[in-house]
Amino acid sequence: MLKTHPMHATLHATDLTRAKRFYAEILGLEPLQELPFALIYECGERTLFTLSESSGVVPGTFTQMSFIVDDIAREVDDLITKGVKFEEYDTEDLRTVSGVADTGALKGAWFKDSEGNLIGLVELSAEYRLPR
């Protein structure tokens, strides 16, 4: 079954050079491997994601990948100083203040990368920490 196999997210990029620059300069990430059509990144605890070249439309209307962080306010502030603009929401289900939503179980913030992918930051409350 798939439950026992590793997995990783794939995000689309219409311009891999631009995406590589964004992920390096803004997020501080360098590719683990560079292929002619994709960049593979490794993050904490050996999690992977791929930026894959695509000529299709990037669906940035929903969260495509999230980073689990310990201090969302610090991460948001750091990214803002690097020019990242966080999404603001004011709906019945979700309201952000200075880019951060607090649901009780978690705090979340969202921004778009250079390719229009919607990336999330998530800080879990103590009672909702993920098992390691």
Image (tube, rainbow, N blue to C red):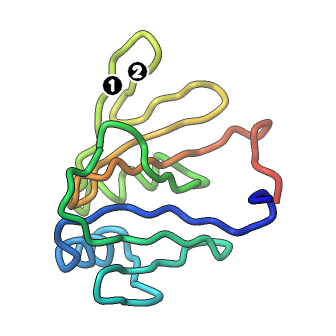
Q: Amino acid at mark 2?
A: Arg
The foreground one among 120 and 107 is 120
Residue beneath disc 2: 95
- Residue 95 picture quarter: top left
- In depth, the one of 23 and 14 nearer the eye is 14
Residue 128: percent from left, percent from top: 75, 38
Mark 2 residue element: loop
Above or below, comparing residue 79 to residue 40 in the picture: above
Q: Which disc is residue 24 wearing?
A: none
Q: Residues within 10 Å of mark 2 (few under 14, many from 20)?
A: some
Q: Residue at x 46, y 30 (%)?
A: 101
Q: Residue at x 57, y 25 (%)?
A: 103
55 in relation to 33, above or below: above
Left or right for 87, reference 129: left
Label 1 element class? loop
Q: Residue at x 29, y 45 (%)?
A: 59
Q: Please rate how many residues cluster around mark 1, counting C-alpha atoms within 10 Å: few if below 14, some from 14 to 19, many from 20.
A: some
Residue 126 position, x and y percent, is: 76, 40
Dot placed on the residue nearer the N-terminal end, 1 or 2:
1
Q: Which mark is residue 89?
A: 1
Which quarter of the figure is the C terminus placed in? bottom right
Q: Which residue is nearer to you in this view: 81 or 96? A: 96
Query: Which residue shows up at 44% across the image and 21% down it?
Result: 94
* Along the viewing direction, whichever of 47 and 72 lies nearer the viewer: 47
Rendered image quadrant of residue 79: bottom left
Going by the image, does 29 lie left or right of 42?
A: left
Q: How many marks?
A: 2
Q: Is residue 70 above or below residue 125?
A: below
What percent of the width, then of the height, locates residue 83? 20, 58
Q: Is residue 32 left or right of residue 17?
A: right
- Which amino acid, by three-letter code, is at mark 1? Tyr
For the residues bearing labels 1 and 2, Cβ distance under 8 angstroms: yes
